[in-house]
Image (cartoon, rainbow, N blue to C red):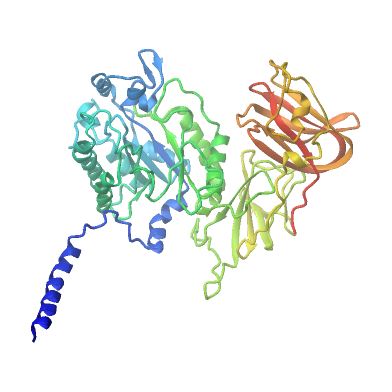
Amino acid sequence: MNRLTWRIVRAALVLSIFVPLAKATEPANPNPYANETPAQRDARMQWWREARFGMMICWGVYAVPAGVYKDKRGGAEWIMSVQGIPKAEYQGFAKQFNPVKYDADVWVRLAKEAGMKYIVLITKHHDGFALFDSKASAWNVVKASPYGKDLLKPLAEACRKHGIKLGFYYSQAQDWCNKTNNNMDDYLRDVAVPQVRELLTNYGEDMPAILWWDTPYDMTAKRGEPFLELLKLKPGVLHNNRLVQPEVGGDFSTPEREIPATGLKNRDWETCMTMNDNWGFVSYDQNWKSAESLIRNLIDIASKGGNYLLNVGPTAEGEFPQASIERLQQMGRWLKVNGEAIYGTQANPFEKLPFDGRCTRLRQGFRLCPQERTTAGQAGGQAAQTSKLFLHVFRRPADGKITLPLSNKITKAYLLADRNTALKVEDKSIVLPDSLPDPIATVVAVEIAGEPDVYELPAPPTAANALSRGKHATASSAWPQPGYEAGKAVDGETATRWGAAAEARSAWLEVDLGQPQRVGRAMICELEYPRTRQFAVEYLDDQTWKPLAKGTTIAGAKVLDFMPVTARQFRLNILEAVEVPTIEEFGVYAPVKVGR
């Protein structure tokens, strides 16, 4: 072997030794799901996607002051920060935190009766007080309160008993009591990471099913790595998008107190909302949302492919407020009849709906009951032979029919409240009964042949193409300053508006088309703030005003379709408002023919 050849061989030998060593020392990816295939992700997310409805429980020492500090209101779970309560004084509230009325079995049974499929408990909020026995910090329910017992263990046992998934919320970044000298890295190393390890290892192999991070202030990708590494202790656990800044990654996004207008495309998501104005218990907060609002929120979210996480704030003694219980029970009664239209569904296939309500679609392969089976497609992966849609009807159309923009044949239609009675189908139109059984939302199940083949509905109306644009308008009253006359509501410009008199809480706005015209649609544009509480669109027939459509809130642009009439004069009659009625545009339009 000559000298040149030997040098080449020796270099190759050296490389063969050191290259594997270099690869071996490369840090492993801390994210346990970094190399997950789409099929593996779908399998891991399946239960959560089918659940659709869960309960958040916001509970801690802040339930003791219950939103009041030295006669000053405000703060709820943020009261220590909002009211500037010194740390030593705030920690004194723990001596009054003694939830002797806490019964985890009662909580879980109520969640189950409400139709919820999972619970997310706030185990430690930004005040740093842990509801579990932690070795990483004595600022917890066992060591700092007279109660002296871990609150998570009985909840985990009750969830296991009743078949409810349990998730743990943990504030990893904000901690006003455990973080000393504002040293983020020491706090993460000594408190947050050990406590998350405790949450992942102390409550059984099956719990938690979710880790719900929050407010990732100062959380860099590097600081998030130890938490991602911990997820490997609980294979399959889900976690949200709030671990690090910017809020990316995780298994699902978490819009708070809002429902995205069109959902979040190509992303799993969950909207969390309160029943009143606060997350934690506040003694004076009685601004409870109605059961109708909560049920319609659930429907709206499911129709856009999301989950609804609805909050309850227990008292310091461990009880749910009675108003929360009543609303959960009402939701449970609705879901007992209509749950098939929520669980295991996916987003509405339509861009626009020809009725006042929402639509969900049964997720392929999902069975609510063992006896209910999705008809399998033919060999070769062809589309399923039958699809099932659910129409959540908020208000019965004036003509009593719903015409779907589908090319498919409708094979069957019935109410979930009356499964044994088939509804009449006329081509693409479903004929509804004379009265709907549920004023909140009556669900019509519709079975169609094949995958939904949807065609586009006519474009929504605009202020500029209304029959009423520029026509003569009058009103019951007008705001005393110039620029708010009745004509401003029919000038085709949403930048201008009519306003009623200063003290008015009801009013009417009339438009004269100049000659009789065929009208079957109206659009009302109000400011986004919901001033109107009750209204009607009417037409004049032989000196008598007759209703065409009715509604409650407007808050934005509302389009109403109704049985067409031929008339010259139309009016918007605002029967009740919480502030001075003011309308940007009121337009009437020719009827819209739905279909090809």
Tell which of 7 and 382 is nearer to you: 7
For the point 17% across and 60% down, which residue is it?
25
Percent of width and height locating residue 111 = 43, 40
Please determine whether, in this image, residue 155 is positioned above or below residue 553. below
Which residue shows up at 19% across the image and 31% down it? 138
Name which quarter of the figure residue 147 lies in. top left
Image quarter where the C terminus lies is bottom right
The quadrant of the rendering that contains the N terminus is bottom left
Q: Provide residue 532's location: percent of width, then percent of height.
A: 66, 28
Farthest top residue in view: 71
**Image coords of residue 510 (percent x, y):** 81, 29
| Nearer to us in this view, 264 or 350 | 264
74 relative to 494, above or below: above
Which of the 4 image quadrants contains residue 556? top right
Q: Residue at image x 42%, y 54%?
A: 47
Q: Is residue 432 left or right of residue 337?
A: right
Q: Is residue 522 visible?
A: no
Residue sitting at the far bottom: 1
Looking at the image, residue 18 sits to the left or right of residue 290; the answer is left
Nearest the eye: 24 or 277: 24
Residue sitting at x 91%, y 32%: 542
Residue 393, position as x, y percentages in the image: 65, 45
Look at the image and tell me whether residue 502 can be seen.
yes
- Total numbered badges shown on the rendered structure: 0
Q: Is residue 127 left or right of residue 528?
A: left
Question: In the visual, does 349 lie left or right of 139?
Answer: right
